[in-house]
Amino acid sequence: MQQNNRLTTWLFIAILAGIGLGLLQPQVALRFEIGGEVFLRLLKMLVVPLVMASVMTGIIGLGDVRRLGRPGIVAVVYYLCTTLMAVIVGIVLVEWIEPGSGGLPNPSVPEAVPAKGMVGEEADIGTILRNMVLMLVTDNLIAAMAETQLLPLIVFSILFAGTLTLLGERVRLVRDFIVQVNEALLTFIMGVMKLAPLGIFCLVAARFGEAQSQGAFLQTLHQTGRYMITVLLGLGVHSALTLALILWLATRRRPWRFLTAMSPALLTAFSTASSSATLPVTMECAVDRARVRREAVEFVIPLGATINMDGTALYEAVAAIFIAQVLGVELSLMQEITVALTATLAAIGAAGIPEAGLVTMVIVLNAVGLPVEYIGILLSVDWLLDRFRTAVNVWGDSVGSAVVERVIAAQPDSRKAS
Ligand code: ASP
């Protein structure tokens, strides 16, 4: 436990030192970019093999793919409900604080944001749902791996491992191989984590240095201050109240303890702004530090990293209503409900990469007829808010794994974690 806390302390120091250096000596801080990039690549390199090996190991551990049914349903219900709750918290706060009323001191920023992936200018709900179904399957497994498209890889892994469980002794070697690869990857991650304080220091220093060297960083913060406070307050309420309460009620785990155990993952999420890149650390922390059963971690966290994004959903709802307020547009109740639903969908569709939420926000704005160009007014601070919402996304996945663990434990003849 003491060793655990030591890592968290070092990570905190690394982040604070990175912010300090970035703001005080931006040119020096920028030189650390290479160190951050190396650390990021080490993490990202592990994501595809880890997701595939861990999801397959999870199914092999269950012994039969049909046993995924109940935990799978609970996981999806958990993802949807918590995302919706996050959105509601965001909407209540943005309507209460009204950060956009009175416009912006300097609203001349709008510039087009490229719409890519599943998002197009014409995005309507039907097209979005159709694209979401298509996102589940790939016609080229290797391409999906090369592009880190995790959803089709998860679907393939479930089906492939399901097949392995049907073939019994004939494929014992393949099963053992997969389980051992997974074991080795988790140990590998523990090694990479030793570099984390250094890598995180470099990442944070370089990013804050970049913002500072572009000038007017603090002034921008001041201009968009009330909007940022609204998002941060929402993220805080959702993490510390909603998710903590769900964790306590569903699992009787103490939220503070669980948070401490998961802290390296949350701090890595803050530093990388990517839930996919953080995935190896999240899994390692959940298994080794929070002691969540592997069967739960192995499929809830990879799936959650791709589709469960409470922080992103909350931010998308707040940002859309903020834009309406800046423009002086009054949204009807129906439109607010549309914002809530589309923000949930947009968050599910967002990839776990930096600032993905900014792109999928086109869906929300289109749905209520707000001008997409106004995403431009959020750009200057998005990189910073992204870090906080990514940490909340990872926190949501972690709590989800503990909740689903309870369901797996309650299944008849559930096996002990290996
Ligand atoms: N960066 C976020 C994540 O990786 C997604 C987003 O909100 O932009 O979870």
Image (cartoon, rainbow, N blue to C red):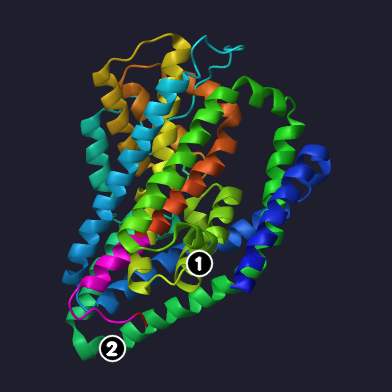
Q: Which mark is residue 172?
A: 2
The x and y percentages for residue 138 are: 29, 54
In the image, residue 91 sits, relative to residue 28, either above or below, namely above
The x and y percentages for residue 62 are: 25, 76
Residue count near mark 1 (Cα–Cα under 10 Å), binned few <14, some 14–19, many ≥20 = many
Determine if residue 335 is in view. yes
Q: Is residue 414 magenta?
A: yes
In the image, residue 268 sits, relative to residue 280, either above or below, namely above
Q: Secondary structure at mark 2?
A: helix
Say which label, 1 or 2, has the lower sequence index. 2
User: Would you identify the image quadrant in which residue 150 lies?
Assistant: bottom left
In the image, residue 169 sits, relative to residue 24, either above or below, namely below
User: Would you identify the image quadrant in which residue 182 lies?
Assistant: bottom left
Q: Residue furthest bottom?
A: 169
In the image, residue 397 sits, relative to residue 108, either above or below, namely below
> What amino acid type is highlighted by mark number 1?
Cys
Question: Where are the magenta residues, as a range?
Answer: 401-416
Image quarter hosting the N terminus: bottom right
Please give the residue where the numbered disc 1 appears in the rendered image. Answer: 285
Q: Residue at x 48, y 52 (%)?
A: 275
Q: Residue at x 55, y 75 (%)?
A: 188
Q: Is mark 2 within 8 Å of ligand 1?
A: no
The x and y percentages for residue 145 are: 41, 60
